[in-house]
Image (tube, helix red, strand yellow):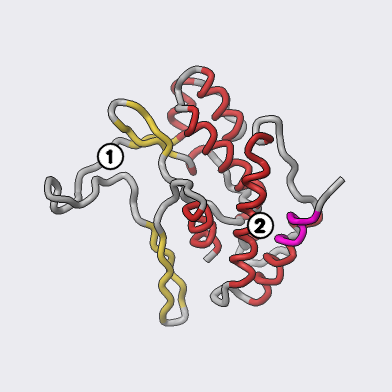
Amino acid sequence: MCEHLALQTLAGAGIAASVSRISIGAGRVFLEVERFDRSPIGPANPQGLGRIGMVSLLVYDAEYVGAMDNWAATANRMAERALLRPQDARTLRLLEAFGMLIANTDRHYGNISLLLQDDNWALAPAYDMLPMLYAPVGGELVPRNFAERPPQPTAATLPEWGEAQALAIRFWHAAAGDLRVSGAFRAIAAHNARSLASPRI
């Protein structure tokens, strides 16, 4: 549910994000995410089966930069070398900040991809964006207190931090108000929203 809500939050702000749907049945919850590396169905392509060239940021960085630490710093390095369009670099910095602020601890370089567009590489829609801090460990739920030590901006994320914070608060409010989310996690989400909205010295 949280992945679905995070992607909807980004898309609602005009940020390219994968299209997802939730299906609930037989006591289970299913997340369906549309592929973005396929050609759309249309008159010239009635079956929509054509593949679009795609590489992960892991592969792209390894080939052209070779300095993997975080998405925002990589965005800046690639923009400086004209390996990433300025708008894509900005979006990647925003995704790093948003991920930090929604407790996404799984921001590895396989969770960002680039698509081939007119012989150039462009940032693919966001995917795998969710609060992984709360993922079960060994099948058990481990108590986490994200609000106790909220993330702080880095030099690379500072320009986009305010926008990312507003989006993160919107996400936590969405999770807190969605009845498909468990009551216990809705309480956590509401607490996190209040924490991010509170001014800090």
The boundaries of the magenta stretch are 192-198
**Could you tell me residue 22's position as x and y percent?**
43, 69
Q: Residues within 10 Å of mark 2 (few under 14, many from 20)?
A: many
Relative vertical location of residue 66 with respect to residue 57 in this rendering, above or below: above
Q: In the image, which disc is placed on residue 150?
A: none
Q: Residues within 10 Å of mark 1 (few under 14, many from 20)?
A: some
Give the residue type at disc 2. Ile
**Could you tell me residue 46's position as x and y percent?**
13, 52
Q: In the image, which disc is placed on residue 52?
A: 1
* Residue 119 horizontal side relative to residue 199, left or right: left
Among all residues in the image, which is located at the extreme bottom?
26
Give the residue type at disc 1. Ile
Element class at badge 2? helix
Q: In the image, which disc is placed on residue 169?
A: 2
Residue sitting at 58 percent across and 36 percent down? 93
Foreground residue among 103 and 9: 9
Q: Are marks 2 and 1 in contact (CB under 8 Å)?
A: no
* Residue 87 horizontal side relative to residue 159, left or right: left
Is residue 69 in the magenta section? no
Q: How many marks?
A: 2
Closer to the eye: label 2 or 1: 2
Marks 2 and 1, the one that precedes in the sequence: 1
Foreground residue among 51 and 167: 167
**Could you tell me residue 170's position as x and y percent?**
62, 59
Residue sitting at 24 percent across and 45 percent down? 39
